Image (tube, rainbow, N blue to C red):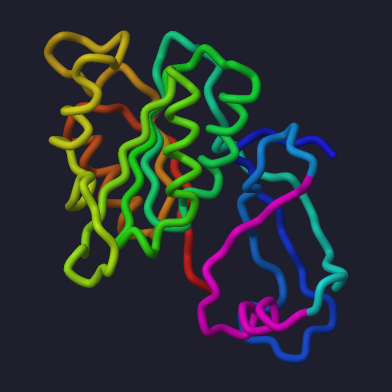
Amino acid sequence: MTFKSGQFMDLTLIDPPETDAEGNTRGFSINNAPDDPELMFTTRLRDTAFKRVLRSMPLGTELKVEGPFGNLTLHNNASRPAVLLAGGIGITPFRSMVRRAAHESLPHRIFLFYANRRPEDAPFLDEMRGLERTNPRFTFVPTMTRMAGSHLPWKGDTGYLNRDTLSRYLRDDAGGASPGNVLAGPIYYIAGPPRMVAGLRTMLNNAGIDDDDVRTEEFTGY
């Protein structure tokens, strides 16, 4: 099987013990790099029929898998940085991209901004930190929005992703940006809850970023 980092597949439960109006098929981003030995998907286990079945199914259960689909894939022009904006489980397509970039020593400059409520809620946090240490072309910027409810220490950024946060990290390293607008050089990728995706797209548009330079994927709970 071949796929591009950032793509997704449709997974269908076969004769599940329960279902709902949404049916038995859901789309999941491919979480691994193309050269990883196993196909991997990651999701949050919410209290829905699909997720309840997923939580309780035994190892070895057969699923119908179709794909890959989607074009949330890394652009070819390596002279333009990639800025990845992830919220929560929206990290999944970007994990595939970042792993691929490291495995293949891609020349792209990649920035991953990753927003979560607390460190406890952030999948792959330590792995992304490790990839940043080993790939000099990769910058990882996690931020937490509700540290008051966390039991873990945090010395990183806090608050929601916004224009100021992006400008602070891109200012010295955004290659190709015009002097008057540090945000104008990269290609942007946004993945996360629908409200976050819409808000960040509006923020980028208000900063003068054309929609042709913004690629998005919304993650609903189902």
Q: Is residue 109 left or right of residue 10?
A: left
Q: Residue at x 47, y 56 (%)?
A: 123
106 magenta-colored: no
Residues 141 and 24: in front is: 141
Residue 54 higher or lower than 145, as above or below: below
Task: Determine which quarter of the picture holds residue 144.
Answer: bottom left
Q: Residue at x 84, y 83 (%)?
A: 15
Residue 159: percent from left, percent from top: 17, 52
43 magenta-colored: yes
Q: Residue at x 46, y 40 (%)?
A: 128
Task: Determine which quarter of the picture holds residue 20.
Answer: bottom right
Highlighted range, magenta: 38-57
Residues 183 and 30: in front is: 30
Q: Total number of numbered labels?
A: 0
Q: Residue at x 80, y 58 (%)?
A: 65
Residues 203 and 174: in front is: 174
Quadrant including the C terminus: bottom right
Residue 208 higher or lower than 90, as above or below: above
Residue 202: percent from left, percent from top: 24, 44
Residue 134: percent from left, percent from top: 49, 24
Residue 52 higher or lower than 157, as above or below: below
Residue that extends furthest to the bottom in the rendered view of this protein = 17
Secondary structure predominantly adopted by residues drawn in magenta: loop
Quadrant including the N terminus: top right
